[in-house]
Every structure is written in C-alpha cells, then in structure tokens.
Image (cartoon, rainbow, N blue to C red):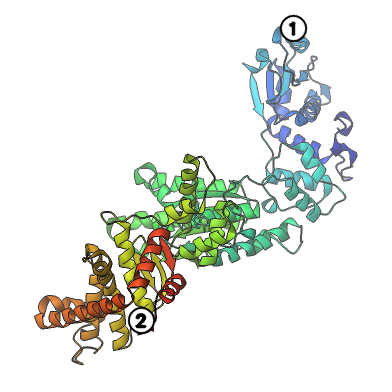
Amino acid sequence: MNGESSAGIDELELGNEADPRSFAQILVDNAIDRVFTEELASECWGRQLTVVLEVPNEQWSERAIARIAETVRAAAVSGGEIKGHLRPYTFRRKPSLQTRPTDDALAIEMLNAVGHGRSIIGVFSPSSAPLPLLTDRPDVHLETGRPSRSDIARAVQTATDQILDPDALPPLDGGDLDGLALAVRPRASAAETCSRLFALARPPIFDEDVPDLRDFAAFGEARAWGLTVLRAIERIKSGDPTAGMNDLPRGVLLVGPPGTGKTLFASALAKTLGINAILTSASEWLASGDSHLGAVVKAMRTSVEQARSRRPCILFIDECDSIVDRDLERGDSVSWWVNFVNAVLTAVDGAVRNRGVILIGACNNMSRVDPALRRSGRMERVIELGLPTECEREAILAHYLKGVIDPASVATLARRSEGRTGADLERAVREAKAAAADAERQILLRDLVEVLFPKSHAGESSRHVAAHEAGHAVTAVLLGVEVRQVDLRGFTRLTNSALQTREAIAKHLTVLMAGRAADEILCGTAVSGAGGSAQSDLGLATKLSSIGHAALGFGSTLRYRAAIDGAAALIETDPAFARLVERDLQAALRRARRLLLRHKNALKAVAVRLEAEHFLDGDQVAQLVRDNQGARSWII
Ligand code: ADP
C-alpha cells in the first residue's frame, strides 16, 4: 500500500513494524473501509454499478483510490477463484477549472468503460472538476466525512503505538492529512504528539472586543479562577504526562446583576484558553416548543451536545435561575420541573464526565437555582461578579478606548464612574465614538463626559440641579461627612457612616435638607427636586428623624415605639409624633441655610464647576470649599 501512495510527507517516516502503513494512509483506509465495504466491492464485480465516493479534499484522493483498488482486488477472489472478468474501472477526478464534460478525456474513457460493461467507481472531492455524467445520478453515493478525534487517536495508535486520549485532544480538522501526518511522528512520545496536535488545531476566532484575561484586569475573583483553568490547560497542551483533562475545574456559577460581564467572561475565558464556547440560556430552552417538555429538553440537549462535540469547550448557561430549585415548585407543575431539572443534570453530567466541557452558569438570584446544579462536579464554585471597582473600570474603559484617550483622563473617568457596570461603560464609549464620528473627528474626553454624566433632569435646568447637589456636597464637607461623588444626574454619594449618635443623625439631616436650602439661596426659591418619593431628600429625612425618635431614643423620650422599618409609619397615626419630626426637619433646614449662607462662595463655586464638568469627586469638592472659605473656619 505504501508504495502506491504519492510520496507525501507522511511516507518519509516508517510506521510500526506490525503495520507498515503510514498514519495518513491508515486514517484514510479506516474512513474508506467504513463506507466502501467488501460487499459493495463484490457487487461491483457482479453487477454493473456506478459509485461516487466523496472525500474531504484532494490530499485524500490518491490514497482513497489506492484503498478502493485494494478492496476491489480482495473482493475479486472468492473461494480461490477470480470472480467475474471485467475489473471495475476506478478513477480519481482531479481539480480543473476548464474541464468540459464533452471533450474531457476522462469522461470519454469512463463512457468507454461503461460501454464495455464495467462498473465505475469515481473519487471526488469538493474541489474536483464536475463530472455531471456520473455525479448527477450514481447508483451509489458515498461520503467518508472527516475523521473524528477518536478516529485520529485510533490511527495514531495503529501507526505508532502511541496511546492518545481522544478527549484530551483539541478539535482537529480530520481532513487535513498533511498537517496531521506532520504532527504524528512514529518516534515521538504520545505527549509530544499531543502537543503537536494542539499546535495544529486552529483556535477559534473571537471578536477583538472580547478581552484576553491575561491582560485584562477586570472580572475580580472570576478572573483568578479563569487563570487557574488556563494554567491547567497549558500543562495539558505542553504534553505534561501528569496533567489531564481530569484536572480541569468542572464549572462555576457567576452571580451578579445584569451587565456585569458574566456572558463576556465566558467568551473571554474561551479566547484566553484558545477553545470554543457555546453560549446558551436556560430561559431560551424553556421558550422552545411552547414549553412542551420534550421540546425544552431537546433544546437543552442540543446545546450540551454542541459543547461536547467541540471539546475542549466552554458551555455557558445564562439565566440559571430559570432552572428553578425543584423544592420551590408547588402544584401541577412539580413533575414537569422535576423531569426538566433531572434531564439537565443528566445531560450536564454526561458532558462534564467525558471531560473537556467546562460549565459556566450565570444568574442574578442564586437562591432560586436548583442546589443540585451547584454540587461538586457541576458548577462547584460560586463567584459573585459585582459592580466593577475603580481599577476595573479603568481597565474596562482603556480596553474599549484602545489608547485614543490619554491614560490620565481614563483614570479620572474611572474614578468618577462609580456604580456603573461594564455594560454602562461599554455603551458610553460606543455612544461617544458615534457622536465623534458624526462630528467627523476623533473622540474627545468631552464626548465621554457628555454620555457618562449627561445633564438629564427632565423639567429641571442643569443649573438648578447643580445648585441643589452643591448644597448637599458643601454642607457635608463643612460638617465633616465624607463625600464620594456629586453627579449632575442628580445625586450626591456620601461614605456610609454609622448613625450612632444624636449628633450624627442631626448632621445627616442637615446634609439632606441642604439641597433645598441651596435651591433657595442660589435659585431664589425651593424647587421640587427635594421631594417626590420615599427615596427623595424629604422622604429620607422624614424616615431618619422618625427612627431617631421612635427607635433609637434620640428624641425627647427614651421610650421605644417602633422598629427601624416601621418608625416613619407613626407619622400617619400620631400627630404629636409628626410635629416632632417636622420640628427636626425645619431645624435641619435652618442649620443648612445658615451654613450655606456663610459659605455662599464655596456653594457657588461647586455649583458652577459641577454644571461644567457634570461630576465632582469628594476631593474636588473639599478643595473648592477650602479655596472659597474666605477668612472663616469651615469645620463647624
Ligand atoms: P451579563 O451577562 O452579566 O448580563 P454581559 O456579559 O452580557 O453581562 O455584558 C454586556 C456587555 O457589556 C458586554 O458585551 C460588554 O460589552 C460589556 N461588559 C460588561 N461587563 C464588562 C466587563 N467587565 N468588561 C468589559 N466589558 C463588559
């Protein structure tokens, strides 16, 4: 057999003694034998058949013809007799762009063979020139397909005695005979072959916006987990005999609010590992086929199967809280859920047990997820993916801005954008880029400031909002309450301080009422921004004062009247209590007014700067207060 093949790279090295065929020939032979059986070859001797056999590409054709010829020869001899007298006519169709069937010499030869009563067996590949005479209506149409990783591992063992674990191999193009033949060398060790096959496997291509975890300082603890997986995969790729797919973590459950990058993390990990990712969602499964159990389970199994067939692969299951804890279900739907969750567990176990599938689940609410999904061997680790830290926001902005804004400005934006998710930051960069593109220029810092800190108070001018927030911020600084950020979108964040003393509560009330005081001082009248909901300044101040009086003993009596959550309700039923609270709020407003009038320059300076920049951090506010304090001491 060896002698009949073309002198390709594979033939330069000898196979093992028991089977002298080259690895590539063995791979082809096994694939051909599966479809072109001796029975079929026998029929080609007995009856006059036309057979078309399709191989993956031209690298296969000559070896395929050689194997077919061998099978045909073997089928000719039955009981020591040569069967028939007309040898089937076999040919390989070469690629050629100009061939026309009518004047093609091969077509004429083939027709002659038909005319003489011979069977025809033609080998084609997708790049072969067409020969419609045969390919349009053959009696038998066969396809070898591409060898799987198990086929490759089996051929490696036959040719070289090296034993490879098919599950530990990367997804390989089994049609690439030359590449495979160069990677599989008889005198190499199994570990060397494994590592050459990894080098041969083309990693999947990811969008450039998908970060590589190695140089992307976000995703917190999840990133550290991902880098552990990377180290395990690198050991396998390097052919380390002590490393195996068994060492890979089985899975993780990411818990966090929407937009914190749970889905992106799965793709980023796949990109970092150079493997595939199948992204699916439990609620997508549940929406299949009108929620008919059969259809839902089928959709789920299809996703799991896709991941299995691409091993090593990440299977990302979003919205795992839709795989509801079976114990939480009641009524008619119990058996439906039990069956569904059991089917998920069985499928997931099958994928994970066969190694090479890494599970990543994501949800917002872990308490709803069926606990069985979180057991060892499944999503065995739970990691919270919360809002990004300042450093992480900087990394995220830098990733999307790709160096078009200077690092110092990126750091400032990161500092100012507390509370934003990765999705918010990505959208801001996208919108700022679009605005710059509309203006036919490069993106500038102010484009980002516009979208990240928009002046968006419906019905209120930004001047009013700036005055109001400046009132809170300046008063807080004056009273020694730490300010984290002031935002023109209408909020001032303070560092949470324990309200353990009467004075702490009084200061906090003053800061809350200072927005209204600033409205009066800078705009001439109070505006509605202080009230409107339980979370408004007035709502929060009312609640705080009520708590002081009814729950904490900071009013005129020590008597405990209500728990913290129920204190404000007393206002509805107890007019005397309502008057106490009203008196506190009025006192706090007067105190804020006094403070701000004495520091009107600072108030104005902060309001003007906030209106211009949309955002100030605590240090900036403190600096402005210091710069505008005049001769007075500003800690009261
Ligand atoms: P989740 O799955 O947690 O709801 P996604 O991964 O779908 O969040 O995030 C939506 C988009 O927001 C992502 O495609 C990405 O553009 C951006 N994003 C979210 N988090 C991050 C992050 N940590 N780093 C970079 N981009 C992020």
Q: Which residue is mark 2?
A: 479
Q: Position of residue 139 (x, y in %)?
A: 64, 18
Dot 1 amino acid type: Asp
Q: As displayed, is residue 127 above or below residue 508?
A: above
Q: Quadrant of the C terminus?
A: bottom left
Q: As displayed, is residue 418 above or below residue 598?
A: above
Q: As displayed, is residue 37 above or below residue 526?
A: above
User: How far apart are the alpha carbons under marks 1 and 2?
Assistant: 98 Å
User: Which label lies toward us, 1 or 2?
Assistant: 2
Q: Position of residue 627 (x, y in %)?
A: 44, 74
Q: Residues within 10 Å of mark 1 (few under 14, many from 20)?
A: few
Residue 318 seen in the current view: no
Q: Is residue 599 left or right of residue 99?
A: left
Between residue 513 and residue 150, name the one nearer to us.
Answer: 513
Between residue 235 and residue 34, name the one nearer to us.
Answer: 235
Q: Residues within 10 Å of mark 2 (few under 14, many from 20)?
A: some
Q: Which residue is mark 1?
A: 103
Q: Quadrant of the N terminus?
A: top right
- Seen at 12% across and 75% down, the residue is 572
Between residue 300 and residue 278, name the one nearer to us.
Answer: 278
Q: Quadrant of residue 103?
A: top right
Q: Quadrant of residue 529?
A: bottom left
What label sits on residue 538 in the rendered view? none
Dot 2 amino acid type: Leu
| Kind of element beneath mark 2 | loop
Residue with the most extreme front position: 631
The first of marks 1 and 2 along the sequence is 1
The verdict on label 1 being within 8 Å of ligand 1 is no
